[in-house]
Image (tube, rainbow, N blue to C red):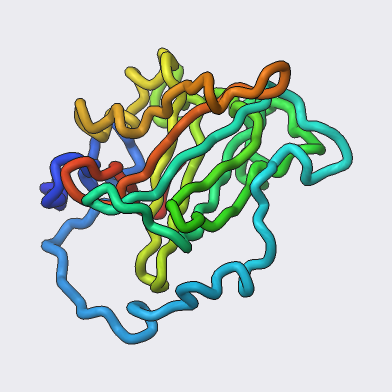
Amino acid sequence: MSQSFKREDASQPPSLHAPYASTVPRSPRQPLVRIPHTLTETTGPANAWSRLMGGALADLTTQHKAMPQGQRIIVSGRVLDEDGRPVPNTVVEIWQANAAGRYIHKKDQWDAPLDPNFTGAGRVITDDEGRYQFVSVRPGAYPWGNHHNAWRPAHIHLSLLGPAFATRLVTQMYFPDDPLIEIDPIANAVPLPYRQRLVSRFDIETTQPNWALGYLFDVVLRGRDGTPFEDDHHD
């Protein structure tokens, strides 16, 4: 088996993590070649995201005629740089399975029910303090074909896009006390203690009485407290 490309930051998952089977065929086989960024990659709409992308899609529970099934949740957090400074005007997109663990995608053929009132996609732009917030439902676990009896923990995908087109970062947020995290090859591609940076924190202050549970999940773009990120191929 070819040696994997090793990232400089120990908190980042390797390109090749054999227990995560699909990394074996898609990880680099040759040393990476540094290619200078072009103008189209280093520039972008910057502060014009809202004009280009339309209004925020912050509440995933009100996109259809009725409420979706499942436990309503509020996910809040901040996007920060390596010195803890807020990063405003960052596009934060999320996508997730419904409460039964089913994505509204043609390739998802698991027999869990689709929810006609839940698409599972949202988008907001961070404010001047780098804050974002979504209302959604807690996603369900689902089986995947990585190995025998493989189940993915409940998780939400996050994509962050900054001032330039080449600044997209992708990560996943897990929920505290989920027993599937410890046996999930994707989560375990990130070594401890960095893996814990992918786990949200239950927060009673964000929780709203008789309505929704609250979770906090900050994203640090780089540095010693950096959030582990992944490539664009993920499950």
At 56% from the left edge and 42% from the top edge, which residue is drawn? 133
Q: How many marks?
A: 0
Does any portion of residue 142 appear in the rendered image?
no
Q: Look at the image and tell me whether residue 39 can be seen.
A: yes
Q: Is residue 149 above or below residue 34?
A: above
Residue 64 drawn at (x, y percent): 83, 43
Q: Position of residue 208 (x, y in %)?
A: 65, 23
Pick out the residue farthest to the bottom.
Answer: 39
Residue 170 lies left or right of residue 33; in this view the side is right
Q: Residue 88 appears at what percent x and percent y?
A: 43, 59
Quarter holding the N terminus is top left
Give the residue at x 39% y 73%: 164
Q: Decide: is 14 above or below 179.
A: below
Between 138 and 142, the residue placed more toward the observer is 138
Identify the residue at image location x=41%, y=13%: 179
Where's residue 228, x and y in %?
29, 42
Lateral position of residue 159 relative to residue 103, left or right: left
Residue 70 against residue 68 in the figure, above or below = above
Residue at image position (69%, 27%) is 111
